[in-house]
Amino acid sequence: MKIKFLGTAAAEGWPAIFCSCDACNKARMLKGKNIRTRSSCLIDDYYMVDFGADTYMNSLRYGIDLSKLKSVFVTHSHSDHFIPYDFELRYGSYAYIEDRKPLMIYGNQSVKKLFEDTFKGNDLDGSVVFNEIEPYKTYRVDHLDLTPHLADHMPDEKCFVYVIQSGKKTLLYGHDSGYYPEETWKNFPKYKFDAVILDCTLGPTDMDLGPDEVWHGHMGINTDEKVKKRLIKMGSANENTKFIVTHFSHNGKLLYDELKDFVSKYGFIVAYDGMEIEI
């Protein structure tokens, strides 16, 4: 399974769109891996997790032909993860596609409502098809098995983290979320994760949490470490599992090299825009 990180920032991006704090100014000056767009990733070239405001520009940055995209797995309805307006540009004379099969979108009820409200009865000539999915059910998507699990993110929406399986490889795409709900933890023992992608919005700012404290809504390094330890303890991960942190906010303050040094003792890989990992 090939994973390409298109964006690795929280909703405001980094540098944040209207911000001039020290962390944003440093990112503007240093550039490189310190420039972070809104989070999404590409799996095996044809499948995306989330489709946010920076998708088009990232397709240009990394040479991705979106006409070949087969499916999009949406975690939740926040605008940095799902911008439905662009899908109008996939039908009619907006797009000439060699193999005009429908682009399949998978997501929860809130994401479905946002999609339907955007197009108000226009079915886009069937060029884009929405599939509402339920937590803890497995859906076959071409050669992938997709299983949404409940996240700890918003109290009024069933937000998802995804277990994605391709052949013998298993990925936990684990953001946006705080420490996972117990119902989700109960499902994890059935999996052996080759890679785990964790929310790190808070960066090091949750390091003062006590041993029994966790952050809700998002994670930081402290909570990431607790998730890692629990997954290893239950046998769902081991020393060969790649633990990757992403979805960074400028409020976490540490730029790429600083963050990489800070998390080295925890065994985390720090994602950056354009990073590719094979599992």
Image (cartoon, rainbow, N blue to C red):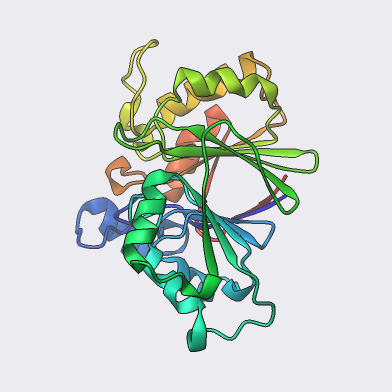
Using residue 140 as the reference point, say whether residue 81 is left or right of it.
left
Where residue 158 sits, quadrant-wise, is top left
Report x, y in % for residue 199.
44, 38
Report x, y in % for residue 218.
36, 34
Using residue 85 as the reference point, say whether residue 149 is left or right of it.
right
As drawn, 216 above or below 64: above
Please tell me which residue is depicted at 39% across the width and 32% down the height of the picture. 219
As drawn, 111 above or below 120: above
Report x, y in % for residue 62.
57, 70
**Does residue 174 appear in this view?**
no
Of 117 and 172, the residue lying toward us:
117
Of 156 and 269, the residue lying toward us:
156
Please tell me which residue is depicted at 69% across the width and 22% down the height of the picture. 190
Using residue 268 as the reference point, say whether residue 210 is left or right of it.
left
Report x, y in % for residue 223.
42, 25
Residue most toward the front? 121
Residue most toward the bottom? 93
Of 146 and 61, the residue lying toward us:
146
Please tell me which residue is depicted at 45% across the width and 78% down the height of the picture. 89
Of 176 and 4, the residue lying toward us:
176
**Does residue 218 appear in this view?**
yes
Please tell me which residue is depicted at 40% across the width and 50% down the height of the picture. 111
